[in-house]
Amino acid sequence: MKLMTKSLAGLIVSAFLAPAALATGPEVFTAQKCNSCHSVKVAGIARLPNPDDDKAPDLSKVGAELDKKAIALFVLKKSEIKGEKHKKAFQGTTEELKTVAEWLAGLK
Ligand code: HEC
């Protein structure tokens, strides 16, 4: 019985924690600071002032070129585009990566 109470408490706690893990694509994008290099104009996301001026592309139509899997692999630095790996490796969770890659792949 004691055990059951404990797991019930665990369930309640995870139910409360779940919304944070289920952030939207744009939320993950800004939380991971993708907008320090990229804008996504179509979603109203501006690029933050960046002294390094990286020339990272606006991602408003990235889904027309890359699907979800290609985006995920690229930001994990596990694949290359035009012979180059992405500047920065994704630092979030797998769940967050799925969310942001799915959102970006839908932008066409
Ligand atoms: C330090 C700057 C920087 C950050 C931060 C950054 N990117 Fe990039 N990204 C680039 C640059 C520059 C390119 C152009 C290709 C290259 O040189 O890697 C690029 C390319 C891409 C591409 C491919 C675009 C295309 O049309 O080929 C995707 C998708 C992408 N980034 C997603 C992301 C996501 C998602 C994040 C956040 C997790 C992110 N980027 C964070 C600099 C950055």
Image: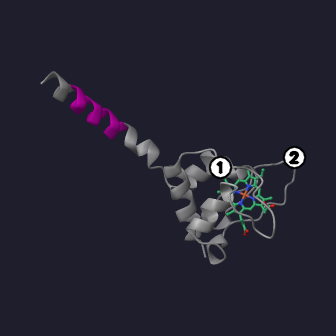
In this picture, is 19 found above or below 69? Answer: above
Q: Residues within 10 Å of mark 1 (few under 14, many from 20)?
A: some
The span picked out in magenta is: 6-16
Assign a secondary structure to mark 2.
Answer: loop
Q: Residue furthest left?
A: 1
Query: Three-letter amino acid code at disc 1?
Result: Phe
Assign a secondary structure to mark 1.
Answer: loop
Q: Residue furthest right?
A: 52
Q: Position of residue 103 (x, y in %)?
A: 54, 64
Split into quadrants, the picture shows ligand 1 in the one at bottom right
Q: Position of residue 48 (x, y in %)?
A: 75, 50
**Residue at image coords 27%, 36%:** 11
In this picture, is 42 found above or below 6? Answer: below
Q: Which residue is mark 2?
A: 51
Q: Position of residue 38 (x, y in %)?
A: 73, 58
Q: Is residue 41 left or right of residue 101?
A: right
In this picture, is 33 found above or below 10? Answer: below
Q: Quadrant of the N terminus?
A: top left
Nearest the eye: 65 or 74: 74
Task: For ligand 1, tell me if the residue under mark 1 lies within 8 Å.
Answer: yes
**Residue 15 covered by magenta stretch:** yes
Q: Is residue 34 left or right of residue 107?
A: right
**Residue at image coords 67%, 63%:** 40
Query: Three-letter amino acid code at disc 2?
Result: Pro
**Residue 10 covered by magenta stretch:** yes
Q: Which residue is mark 1?
A: 90
